[in-house]
Image: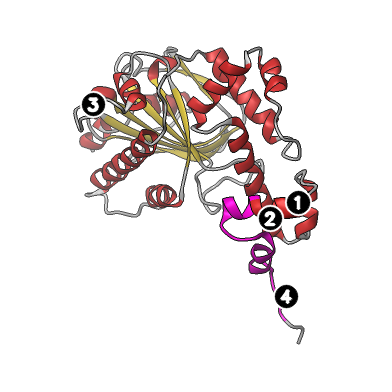
């Protein structure tokens, strides 16, 4: 029992105390009078820990961060929109959300308090930057990773979660391993996720890394939100830059640094994700989907869809037609 308590994060213990309850085998159940859901927390060793949140509270709370001095040099990997439907709490999830992970240096959040939001469904993995730096030797051209692992400036990157990453996440969420091996199994999975994400970041062609601040990040995400809310209208850089109070050059540079893609390419990717979702639902025809997403030329829509999804929209639509069983 003492060994388990030693591997439970202090921040979750503080959360449990605030809720008037206790953790049990790394798990915190949210008392019904405060909300519903759960938190899991594991301190694997002095270098890496993982927190799993899937809960809804009746109101926001704030707790002191007891680990503030201990985690000042960590890199945070925050997975969002990753819980399977069977695990997600039954609340509204915006249609444009997509599984992704935020990768940030701790210097972006050095507050001594932590806001506990009413609706949280994330997996946070925190890893000591020095520990990661000692695991492999980076070539000189790996400019992005060198800056991230040095952990001396505020940085944030967002990476879409591809199927092989989602598979590992699902293994973590649905873990049913024997308690004897639980910490060992989950640490391996956490480190596998981190390794695969660093491999993806290393592919990004970034010759210059720009230091970020909270205002820049907020504005970039507002640009993203504004763009994805109007998928029928291609983004105009000048208008987006004006709304963000940035120069067009700064907007383009920071957007590509955070998301690993140009503004238009990012927009087009989400546009095709929405097209595939609408075709899968089957309520609209191919031409209706194309027009709904702002295409006046359906031949062009077909070419763009094929370049992103790998199959033409008519074929995709036929593949996902739900056949009604014959009446008896």
Residue 12 percent across, percent down from the top left: 39, 29
Q: Residues within 10 Å of mark 2 (few under 14, many from 20)?
A: some
Viewer can see residue 307: yes
| Distance Cα–Cα, label 4 vs label 1 | 25 Å
Quadrant holding the N terminus: top left
| Distance Cα–Cα, label 4 vs label 3 | 56 Å
Marker disc for residue 133: 3
Residue 185 percent across, percent down from the top left: 26, 48
Q: Which sits in the foreground, 20 or 304?
A: 304
Quadrant holding the C terminus: bottom right
Q: Residues within 10 Å of mark 4 (few under 14, many from 20)?
A: few
Residue 31 percent across, percent down from the top left: 51, 36
Q: Which residue is mark 4?
A: 324
| Distance Cα–Cα, label 1 vs label 2 | 8 Å
Marker disc for residue 68: none
State yes or no: discs 1 and 2 in contact (Cβ < 8 Å).
yes
Marker disc for residue 302: 2
Tag 1 secondary structure: helix
State which region is magenta: 304-325
| Distance Cα–Cα, label 2 vs label 3 | 45 Å
Q: Residue at x 75, y 45 (%)?
A: 293
Q: Residue at x 42, y 15 (%)?
A: 154
Q: Is residue 310 one of those drawn in magenta?
A: yes
Q: Residues within 10 Å of mark 3 (few under 14, many from 20)?
A: some
- In primary-sequence order, the first of circles 4 and 3 is 3
In the rendered picture of this protein, how many numbered marks are placed on residues?
4
Viewer can see residue 61: no
- Which of label 2 and label 3 is nearer to you? 2
State yes or no: discs 4 and 3 in contact (Cβ < 8 Å).
no
Q: Is residue 241 above or below residue 301?
A: above
Q: Which residue is mark 1?
A: 290
């Amino acid at each position: 029992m003492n060994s388990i308590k030693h591997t439970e994060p202090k921040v979750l213990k503080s959360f449990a105390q605030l809720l008037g309850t206790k953790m049990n085998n790394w798990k915190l159940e949210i008392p019904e009078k405060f909300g519903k859901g759960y938190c899991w927390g594991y301190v694997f060793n002095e270098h890496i820990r993982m927190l799993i949140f899937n809960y809804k509270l009746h109101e926001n709370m704030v707790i002191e961060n007891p680990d503030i001095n201990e985690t000042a040099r960590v890199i945070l990997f925050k997975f969002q929109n990753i819980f399977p439907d069977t695990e997600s709490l039954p609340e509204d999830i915006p249609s444009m959300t997509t599984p992704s992970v935020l990768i940030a240096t701790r210097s972006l959040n050095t507050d001594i308090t932590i806001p506990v939001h009413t609706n949280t469904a994330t997996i946070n993995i925190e890893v000591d930057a020095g520990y990661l730096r000692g695991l492999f030797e980076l070539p000189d051209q790996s400019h992005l990773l060198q800056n991230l692992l040095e952990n001396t400036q505020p940085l944030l990157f967002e990476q879409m979660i591809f199927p092989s990453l989602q598979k590992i996440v699902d293994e973590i969420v649905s873990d049913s391993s024997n308690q004897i091996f639980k910490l060992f199994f989950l640490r391996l999975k956490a480190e596998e996720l981190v390794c695969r994400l660093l491999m993806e970041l290393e592919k990004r062609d970034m010759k210059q890394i720009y230091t970020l601040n909270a205002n820049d990040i907020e504005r970039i995400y507002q640009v993203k939100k504004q763009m994805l809310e109007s998928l029928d209208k291609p983004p105009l850089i000048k208008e987006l830059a004006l709304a963000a109070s940035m120069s067009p050059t700064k907007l383009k540079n920071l957007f590509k640094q955070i998301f690993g893609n140009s503004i238009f390419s990012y927009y087009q990717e989400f546009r095709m994700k929405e097209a595939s979702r609408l075709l899968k639902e089957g309520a609209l025809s191919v031409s209706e989907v194309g027009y709904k997403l702002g295409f006046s030329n359906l031949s062009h829509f077909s070419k763009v869809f094929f370049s992103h999804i790998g199959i033409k929209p008519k074929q995709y639509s036929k593949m996902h037609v739900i056949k009604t069983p014959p009446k008896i």
